[in-house]
Image: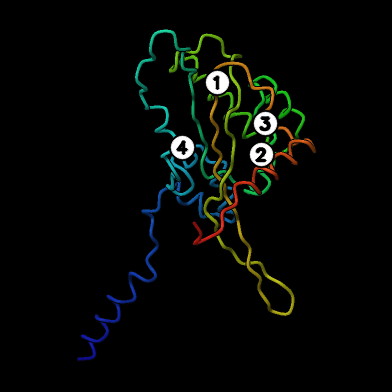
């Protein structure tokens, strides 16, 4: 009976203390002392997304849309190119400021303005714009790579990995490692003069107010 108990305990304890050498090098590097930094600079993990998480993929499906041919006399439809980068190790709030800055700019002007920002987010957006510019010439029959402008540029929140930071007096605090997704759409042609509508003048505001007042209706009336 004692021998049987020893054999059972040995069989249970052996897997607990046996080292597991099946862990691949990619996962081992990702789970090192700094998992977020190690994964963001690992080219193999970067191709698959952080720890195999690819993030949203629907944005790229806009490149597969086939529009019906234009009628005779109508202007040609400008080419549109959508591109993105997911799971960027950067704050989504900081990325949103840089993404908003280049809206409505030509591709050359956007790259020039981003070159003055010595931040990681500006470098990431510059790389995405260059990739989208190359896609436009290679896959979307854009004749001149400089004949593009930024029609849409925005960033969204990605995954958030929680960690622990040691404080004084045996206390611990929560650390959040934030990731973000960046999306951009380039359109062929020259950028518009006003990307957003210009501010209304006083006379235009007065006309809008009068129009709203005249459009009022009394509820449950004739």
Which label was assigned to residue 47? Answer: 4
Tell me the CA gap for discs 2 and 1: 18 Å
* Mark 2 element type: helix
Q: Quadrant of residue 67?
A: top left
Frontmost residue, 79 versus 1: 79
Find out whether the residues at labels 3 and 4 contact each other: C-beta distance under 8 Å: no
Tell me the CA gap for discs 3 and 1: 15 Å
Q: Quadrant of residue 207?
A: top right
Tell me the CA gap for discs 4 and 2: 18 Å
Find out whether the residues at labels 3 and 2 contact each other: C-beta distance under 8 Å: no
In this figure, which residue is indicated by the disc labeled 3?
102
Residue at 73%, 27% in the rendered image = 113
Residue 108: x, y in percent?
67, 19
* Mark 1 element type: helix
Residue at 66%, 38% in the rendered image = 100
Residue at 64%, 37% in the rendered image = 99
Which label was assigned to residue 121? Answer: 2
For this orientation, the residue located farthest to the right is 202
Name the N-terminal-most of marks 2 and 1. 2
Q: Quadrant of the N terminus?
A: bottom left
Name the N-terminal-most of marks 1 and 4. 4
Q: Mark 2 or mark 1: which is in front?
A: 1
Tell me the CA gap for discs 3 and 2: 13 Å
Which label was assigned to residue 133? Answer: 1
Q: Mark 3 or mark 4: which is in front?
A: 3
* Mark 4 element type: helix
């Amino acid at each position: 009976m004692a021998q049987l108990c020893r054999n059972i305990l040995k069989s249970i304890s052996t897997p607990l203390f046996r080292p597991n050498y099946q862990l691949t090098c990619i996962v081992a590097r990702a789970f090192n002392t700094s998992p977020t930094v190690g994964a963001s600079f690992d080219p193999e993990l970067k191709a698959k997304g952080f720890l195999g998480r690819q993030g949203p993929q629907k944005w790229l499906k806009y490149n597969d849309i086939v529009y019906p041919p234009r009628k005779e006399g109508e202007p040609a439809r400008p080419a549109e190119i959508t591109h993105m980068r997911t799971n960027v190790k950067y704050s989504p709030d900081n990325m949103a400021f840089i993404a908003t800055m280049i809206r409505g700019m030509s591709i050359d002007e956007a790259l020039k303005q981003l070159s003055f920002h010595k931040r990681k987010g500006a470098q990431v957006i510059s790389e995405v714009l260059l990739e989208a510019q190359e896609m436009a010439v290679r896959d979307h029959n854009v004749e001149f790579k400089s004949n593009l402008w930024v029609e849409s540029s925005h960033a969204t929140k990605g995954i958030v990995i929680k960690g622990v930071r040691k404080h004084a007096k045996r206390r611990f605090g929560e650390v959040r490692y934030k990731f973000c997704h960046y999306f951009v759409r380039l359109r062929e042609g020259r950028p518009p003069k006003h990307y957003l509508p210009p501010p209304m003048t006083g006379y235009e505001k007065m006309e809008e107010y009068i129009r709203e007042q005249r459009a009022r209706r009394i509820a449950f009336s004739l």
